[in-house]
Image (cartoon, helix red, strand yellow):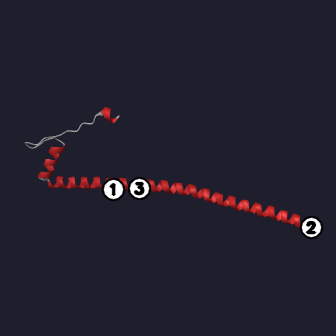
Amino acid sequence: MRRKKANRTRNFIILTGLLICYLLVWGAIIYSMSDGYKTYISLKQRRQKLVKEELALKEHMDEIRKKTEMRRADSPFFVEMIAREKLKMAKKGEVIIKVVKDDKAAN
């Protein structure tokens, strides 16, 4: 009788130990997956930021390409655009409004 009870106790301890090891292994796996998921989320956010930056750069390149084409054509529209933007010139009767950034308001 004592022997059967000792075997049951020993089997219970062994099974409990195996169960604890099993749970620890799964806990470690889940914990490492958590780190991987955090890395995935940060990379996904970085990708979105880079996609937005790429779109902005493409728009800027298109603008530069258009200006280059106008320079090559030496169009009157381009000459007028340069006169208005860089030389601050206006036609008769037009008003130029200049926006000045206030350093105190920015801080």
Q: Earlier in the sequence, mark 2 or mark 3?
A: 2
Task: Give the amino acid type for the residue marked by disc 1 in the picture.
Answer: Leu
9 to 68, vertically: above or below? below
Question: What distance separates the C-alpha of mark 3 from that of mark 1?
Answer: 11 Å
Residue at point 57%, 56% (across, down): 34
Few, some or many C-alpha atoms within 10 Å of disc 2 (few <14, some 14-19, many ≥20)?
few
Q: Is residue 25 left or right of residue 41?
A: right
Residue at point 43%, 56% (across, down): 47
- Residue that badge 2 annotates: 1
Q: Is residue 78 left or right of residue 21?
A: left
Q: Earlier in the sequence, mark 3 or mark 1?
A: 3
Q: Earlier in the sequence, mark 2 or mark 1?
A: 2
- Residue that badge 3 annotates: 48
Residue 5 location (% of width, % of height): 88, 65
What is the secondary structure assignment of the residue under circle 2? Answer: loop
Question: What distance separates the C-alpha of mark 2 from that of mark 1?
Answer: 80 Å
84 to 67, vertically: above or below? above
Task: Give the amino acid type for the residue marked by disc 3 in the picture.
Answer: Gln
104 to 63, vertically: above or below? above
Which residue occupies the foreground of this view, 29 or 59? 29
Residue 107 location (% of width, % of height): 35, 34
- Residue that badge 1 annotates: 55
What is the secondary structure assignment of the residue under circle 3? Answer: helix
What is the secondary structure assignment of the residue under circle 1? Answer: helix
Task: Give the amino acid type for the residue marked by disc 2 in the picture.
Answer: Met
Residue 99 location (% of width, % of height): 22, 39
